[in-house]
Image (cartoon, grey):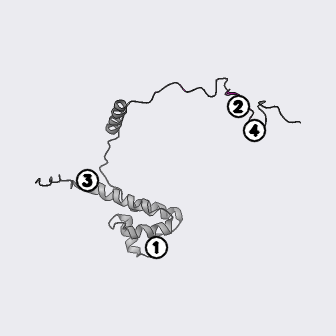
Amino acid sequence: MGPQPFGSGKGLGRGGPHALGISFNGAAAFRPRKGRRRPTGKEDHVARKKTARRFAYEPDYAVPPGGTLQETIDALGIDQRELAARAGVSAKHVNQIIKGTAPITHDTAIRLERVTRVPARMWNNLEANYREQLARLAGSTAPIASPARR
């Protein structure tokens, strides 16, 4: 077979139906889509307000990051003792993290990252979210006194 003429739709290159502005269903390929227009500032504010109300679910429980840690080490095929040995912490400490009684410190998060290849940032975020949820459930969000005015 010889070379295909330009725009024949066969082979690679600039040819083909899209080069001619024709889509596979016969409509123009470069026609702007009709439909939703971009919302104005007021409409966008109303949409965000509705979304905030719609997803304002607050669970009445807190999940310790140790649950994720247990799932991770299960997936890696290691146990708590092996994780402790590789991370350089005690097995008791790993068990307390999994139960949620000991927090994951920044140092521990870095050690876990080295063993599990899960970023330390994720361990820190899981810990922060867990402690925040515990505080919310305990009702310790007393109003803060306003600073004295001069």
Amino acid type at mark 4: Gly
Mark 1 or mark 4, which is nearer the start of the sequence? 4
Q: Residues within 10 Å of mark 3 (few under 14, many from 20)?
A: some
Mark 3 or 1, which is nearer the eye?
1
The x, y position of residue 70, in whole percent, is: 44, 63
Identify which residue is drawn at 41% across, 60% down.
67
The x, y position of residue 59, in whole percent, is: 32, 48
Secondary element under disc 1, as helix, strand or loop, is helix
**Separation (CA) of disc 3 from disc 1:** 32 Å
Amino acid type at mark 1: Ala
Q: Give the residues in magenta.
A: 14-38
Do the residues bearing badges 3 and 1 touch, measured as CB atoms within 8 Å?
A: no
User: What is the number of the mark on residue 87?
Assistant: 1
**Separation (CA) of disc 4 from disc 3:** 63 Å
What residue would you read off at disc 3? 137
Mark 2 or mark 4, which is nearer the start of the sequence? 4
Do the residues bearing badges 2 and 1 touch, measured as CB atoms within 8 Å?
A: no
Mark 3 or 2, which is nearer the eye?
2
Q: In terms of depth relative to the viewer, which is nearer, 28 or 70?
A: 28
Mark 4 or 1, which is nearer the eye?
4
The x, y position of residue 68, in whole percent, is: 43, 59
Amino acid type at mark 3: Leu
Amino acid type at mark 2: Ala
Identify which residue is drawn at 48% across, 65% down.
73
What residue would you read off at disc 2? 19
**Separation (CA) of disc 4 from disc 1:** 54 Å
The x, y position of residue 41, in whole percent, is: 36, 32
Identify which residue is drawn at 78% across, 37% down.
11
Q: 52 left or right of 143?
A: right
Q: Quadrant of the C terminus?
A: bottom left
**Separation (CA) of disc 3 from disc 2:** 61 Å
Mark 1 or mark 2, which is nearer the start of the sequence? 2
